[in-house]
Image (cartoon, rainbow, N blue to C red):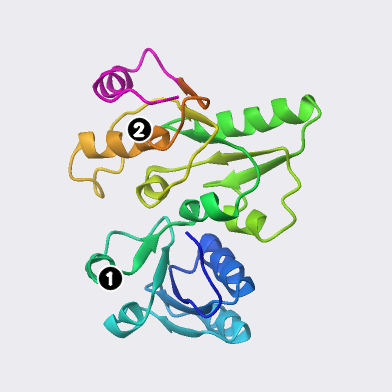
Amino acid sequence: MLIRPQTRVLIVGLGKSGRSALRFCQGLGAVVSVSDAGAVEAEKAHWLAGQGVEYELGGHSREFFEAAEVIIVSPGVPDLPLLQAAGRRGAAVIGELALAPDYLRTPVMAVTGTNGKTTVTTLLADLLRAAGRKVFVGGNIGTPLTDYLSGPQEADWAVLEVSSFQLDMAGGFRPRLGVILNISPDHLDRYKTMEDYALSKMSLLRNQLADDSAVLNADDPMICRLLGENPPLA
């Protein structure tokens, strides 16, 4: 997803990911605004005032969403009716992973699963470092991807922990190595069915090509069933 100078970008959610996305988009010359439904806090307002952006705290308004050409949604934000309406009128509604195809110059190892994501992501990074590689570790843990995109991108590999929420708005994100550890019931307050949640996890492989790699858990019945129904190219 290319963001050109003067593109009107709305950041929804002002956690670590949202703040990083704001800085990244400002660096591209975008006109950035922020909508955050969390508690109105002096620290948030002070930080936003220092960024020189238009913002709203404590709720979301239709005016902010209708003015945006691109809406970058933080992972913890639910599927709001305002987001659905923005998508219908033609706004690009994305998460930070959707920025990777146009801005990330480093190959990616991406790890998802219901359990064990952080452990395996950390282990992969440690193995790469032990092999003498420079590594960026982030995504759903630690440092947001947009922090890395804003810098010189000097790593040999980006190792990312990715959640189902991030994958739901990942656009054309394509890991060179995709790892799905397991799928068991989780986040069913956000997904209508277990099947929907599982398909979200499996979407990690959606954009992979034949020369990419996928590492999957052959003991997980949900993974095996969905793999048989829609084999990846990797």
Q: Residues within 10 Å of mark 2 (few under 14, many from 20)?
A: many
Picture residue at 29% right of the left edge, 17% below the top: 221
Q: Secondary structure at mark 1?
A: helix
Please give the label number shown on residue 33.
none
Q: Position of residue 117 (x, y in %)?
A: 50, 33
90 up-or-down from 31: above or below: above
Q: Please state which amino acid type lies under the numbered disc 1.
A: Ala
Q: In this picture, which residue range is highlighted in magenta?
A: 216-234
Q: Secondary structure at mark 2?
A: helix
Q: Residues within 10 Å of mark 1 (few under 14, many from 20)?
A: many
Query: In what quadrant of the picture does the C terminus appear?
Result: top left
Q: Please state which amino acid type lies under the numbered disc 2.
A: Met
Residue 172 left/right relative to 90:
right
Q: Nearer the viewer, residue 69 or 43?
A: 69
234 up-or-down from 153: above or below: above
Residue sitting at the far top: 219
Q: Position of residue 192 (x, y in %)?
A: 18, 45
Determine the CA span between mark 2 and mark 1.
Answer: 26 Å
Which mark is first along the chain, 1 or 2?
1
Query: Is 232 colored magenta in this rendering?
Result: yes
Q: Which residue, given by chain and number where applicable, does mark 1 sit on?
A: 86
**Label 2–label 1 contact, CB within 8 A:** no
Picture residue at 37% right of the left edge, 12% below the top: 219
Q: Which residue, given by chain and number where applicable, does mark 2 sit on?
A: 202
Q: Position of residue 231 (x, y in %)?
A: 32, 22
